[in-house]
Image (cartoon, rainbow, N blue to C red):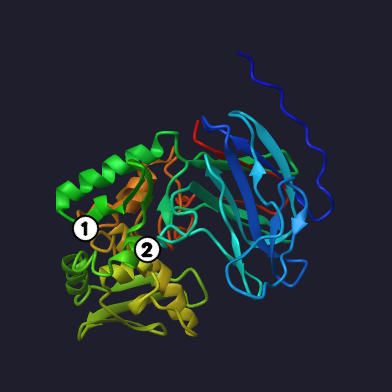
Amino acid sequence: MANPPQRVLDAAPAGYLNVALQNKSSSSQVFAYITGLDLSNNNRPIFIQSDGRTVYSPTSPSSTGAALAADVAIPLGAPGNTVNAVIPKIAGGRIWFSIDGKLTFLLNPGPAVVEPSVTNSSDPNINVNWCFAEFTYNDAQLFANISYVDFVGVPVGMSLTNSSGNTQSVPGMGASGLSTVVSEVQAQAKRDGRPWDKLVVSSNGKPLRVLSPNNLLVGNSHAWDGYYDAYVQQVWSRFQGTDLIVNTQAAAGNLTGRVANGKLTLPQAGDFNAPSAADIFSCSTGPFATGSNAARNAVIPRLAAAFNRSTLLDATQFPNGSSPQNYYKNAVTNHYSRIVHSVQRDGRGYAFPYDDVVPDGGQDVAGTIFDSNPTLFTLTVGGN
């Protein structure tokens, strides 16, 4: 069967960008939603309406949980169909997809958008099959990634074409990606006795999504107690007599430190206590809580990434001493992230909060695309 002819899109209005939304699923009930903060209107929350073009800027409601005053579900039509949309300059943007059901967005005073949740059992979207990609489109560039930081669900892929006709792409998972992740986390639970299988969320007896280990903590704060303890102690013991170097890849340069009295001390960045599993999976608590110290804030992503990838026994410089071939080799590691990467067609996807940390000149593993002269942002849903 011949490929259909490529559609030639009209140039987007000044300050706007063409977005192609493609239904690559097997369902005719697929909807897209575009949300973010309007950079031309004091960062007010906005949606793109169901026509794929009209901006809806909600007003502040008088009470919490108010309904939207516009239809923001963009129907994608039958499998194989493409819907063309346009977006203005947006910060903190997301393009959401749902299959076989619509999403419900609500408003709180502000206005503040109440987005779908995978951890709130009372959320109206808890049994809806949905996913999203993240993006920012401003005067400097379009930057986007496929996010698995919270969960894995419907496969999403994306590409970005610039004014010279060059295209970057992140293919994402195939249609069977979720079922493979489910099988792999269940197998990992059998191997080490840890609750990887509890990451699987089902609806009507079928797997709906797989949560990140950090999100499992929302309902079970002790789920990962002790998981990283032995590994952390090995790391702390190693660097009592060996220098640990953090390449901050920022103004602080390379910082060299050692462990003494139970703390890792790095010049300018201060002392770091031994992290717990919850600290490592969240990348934001305990020693990884950011603050006003610029050097410390540069160390935290690189140290947290090394713990999630379990590379701290294999190198002495982070991230510059390791490469993707050495990630997740230790028996104690972020197996969710390992499995998520393994099911991506090109191995790239954003699986934990600092998965975009890479060695200088190293390859991207987070599945990011960006360009200063974008002309077409394409997203596919369904993996077929």
**SS for dot 1:** loop
First in sequence: mark 1 or mark 2? 2
- Work out whether residue 318 or residue 353 is closer to the camera in this orientation and state it: 353
What is the x, y in percent for residue 361?
49, 55
Q: Is residue 3 visible?
A: yes
Check disc 2 and report its element: helix, strand or loop.
helix
Dividing the picture into quarters, in which one does residue 94 lie?
bottom right
- Residue 33: assigned label: none
From this view, report whether residue 114 is shown above or below residue 243.
above
Q: Amino acid at mark 2?
A: Ala
Residue 41 position in % (x across, y down): 77, 69
Above or below residue 17? Residue 314 is: below
Residue sitting nearer the eye, 317 or 48 = 48
Q: Is residue 273 left or right of residue 341?
A: left
Q: Position of residue 196 (x, y in %)?
A: 25, 53
Q: Residue at x 58, y 39 (%)?
A: 30
- Name the residue tied to disc 1: 332
Is residue 316 found left or right of 39 in the rendered image?
left
Q: On the image, which quarter does residue 11 sit in? A: top right
Mark 2 — residue?
305
Graded by Cα atoms within 10 Å as few (under 14), some (14 to 19) or many (20 or more), the crowding at tag 1 reads: some
**296 versus 198 height, above or below:** below
Q: Amino acid at mark 1?
A: Val
Quadrant for residue 28, please give it. top right
Where does the image place residue 39, in percent across and percent down from the top left? 73, 66
Q: Quadrant of the N terminus?
A: top right
Q: Can the viewer see residue 327? A: no
Q: CA distance from mark 1 to mark 2?
A: 14 Å
Who is closer to the viewer here, 124 or 307? 124
Left or right for 125, reference 216: right
Please name the residue shown 32% across and 61% down the image. 216
